Amino acid sequence: MSQIDPPRTPRSNLTPIEQAALVKLEQLRADGQRWFQQSLGLPPRVVDGSDLASDDALTDPWLLSATASQRINIAVDNFDALLGSIHSVDADGRLGITTRPYALAPLIRASFETACSAVWLLGPDRSSERAARALALAFRDAKHQLDGASALKRDADSRNLVAASTLSTIPELKAAYALEVAEIRSAIAARVAPADSVNASTGHTRIVRDAGVLSGFGEDRAEWVWSALSGASHGQQWAINSLSSVEVVDQHAGDRVTATWTLNLPTAVGLCSYAHEMISHARRIWALRNSPRSA
């Protein structure tokens, strides 16, 4: 863990690169707080005559606007929590900066990934293509829900818990989830033209790369950022090494060493900036799609 904990005049203890990172961090922190206060987890109103209103008509009851706004709110919530974990000011006005070697990666990843998902949903110019993507995501979510209920049922059966009161509704849940999967499949067949069809198994890599193109972030750059953050979140050593500073603290006999990994302040702020950039684009394109002038 790298920590400034917290000196009276922290800026005097920082290198020029860290000073610049701190300035950027404070800007990101202000945006995160402002975005969070504006959203508070609530979906914004869809404007009549907007692209989003047309999209919702094509995707009802699996509203594209609800899916996209939730993705943006999730990105913002994680981003605000992320910046709050790094940057703090105590009651005496003293600044505290803390970076952690591993725990920041999942928050940055969640911010970046869900913002990419919103951009992927909102980005295409044609309403029919946006609707196809929203229904594909709805189908995948419903299928995962059904798979989860099936796993829960198998677990209950294996432990002879079928009669337990808290699990007695599993068959009904499975039936309801299976019905929703079938309804979404039917909606896709009826509402989505073959040219706009989206494979329901489209993975995050494709979504992230497409978002990189739509946002101007760059598809290869977006994939690398997402892959590194995902790998670090899952404990993959290549990703941890690529994001962290390594310091050898002990040399043992042979080739064995003891080392520590630190996500330094400039690197942490740089990664936060990537999430900020993608969230900013998601918010801009939401505003565009929710304007009557875009209809």
Image (tube, rainbow, N blue to C red):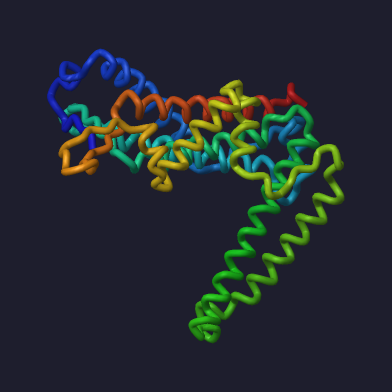
Q: Residue at x 55, y 71 (%)?
A: 152
Kindly indicate the quadrant of the structure image that contains residue 99: top left
Q: Quadrant of the C terminus?
A: top right
Q: Position of residue 74 (x, y in %)?
A: 50, 42
Lateral position of residue 9 relative to residue 291, left or right? left
Lateral position of residue 213 relative to residue 2, left or right? right
Front residue of this view, candidates 111 and 199: 199
Q: Residue at x 56, y 23 (%)?
A: 217
Q: Vertically, is 180 above or below 63?
A: below
Front residue of this view, candidates 112 and 176: 112
Q: Residue at x 18, y 33 (%)?
A: 91
Q: Residue at x 53, y 78 (%)?
A: 167
Task: Name, please, the residue furthest toward the front.
Answer: 254
Front residue of this view, candidates 251 and 3: 251
Q: Quadrant of the N terminus?
A: top left
Q: Vertically, is 13 above or below 81?
A: above
